[in-house]
Image (spheres, helix red, strand yellow):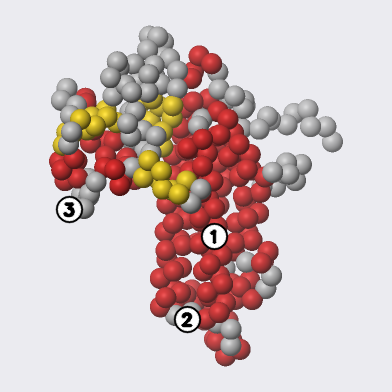
Amino acid sequence: MSNSNRQPWHPCRDAIKPIAEALANLSAHTLTKDLPDRLAGSATQRPSGWLADQYRGPDRRVPAGRREQARRWLQMFINGATAAEFENRTAEARDRLRAWEDAARAAANSPESYERCRDLIERGCHVELVDRYGEDIREQFNDVMDYAEETADYLRSLAWMVNAKIGDRNQTTPEPSQQTESESGKPVWTFSDECDVVRWGDHTFTFTPMQAKVVAALKERYDNGTPQISEVRIGSKVDGGDEFRISKTFRNTVNGKKVTHPALGTMIAKDGTHYSLVPPESPDNPAK
């Protein structure tokens, strides 16, 4: 069969969005009626094996798989920090699921426990199934599902950012005219609705929910014509608590190490105890 009509690979349609949907659907998949059989079986039968298949994708002609393809594309056409965050978040979701599976298997390794689990499933008691493994296992399960949904939300925001950069066209490289300047000739500076994705000149930054709240607070002040705002005031606006610090909030884990978010010191400037947004074309921009 000819592949002449096959669409070119697109980072959102063929990689980022399918992985986001897989993580969002993980809870429903994990609570299937054959969960005890999956946990007792081989690694490929477990929910983490299913998730690994989603990371690879159905096209076996692509040895690297959709997750690795997306990482490489982000590294090449967005920036290294975004590629690393994508890789770390998806790996963390997978690893947390594997850890939960191992703990659940250890908690249900007796024949009596195994049979009780089967009985609970047959009666449709999926919540009891999680409880049956023990309080710690139930809490760990909830943490795994929460992180999977959080990662799915992050990937949806990432897909929005990628589409904003290259559009829905079937292309793997952004148009040069789209990368750094608007029609007015000034560097692009755009925000998503939740301020979790920002195009800032030739950089595209993604932010965690708390970081996005800070960006939104800074943007509000910038739009009002009084860009500077104190760290204490920011903490109050984002419900950061008494221990809130910008320097701690804008620390991300990259390759197992804590690093400062690239927006801090570039798009976000500090002046004493106050912070403000800096446009990409500003002479105060330290990145220029």
> How far is the residue under mark 2 from the one under mark 1?
22 Å
- The amino acid pointed to by label 1 is Asp
Of label 3 and label 2, which has the lower sequence position?
2
| Observer-nearest of 120 and 247 | 247
Name the residue rendered at 58%, 30% in the picture: 76
Residue 228 appears anywhere in the view: yes
Q: Amino acid at mark 3?
A: Asp
Mark 1 packing: few (<14 Cα in 10 Å), some, or many (20+)? some
Q: Mark 1 — residue?
A: 95
Query: Which residue carries the number 2 mark?
Result: 132
Residue with the mark numbered 3: 242
Q: At 23% from the left edge and 36% from the top edge, which residue is drawn? A: 217
Residue 114 image-quadrant placement: bottom right
Which element is circle 1 on?
helix
Give the class, few, some or many, for how many residues have Cα within 10 Å of label 2's Cα (few <14, many ≥20).
Answer: some
39 or 123, nearer to the observer: 39
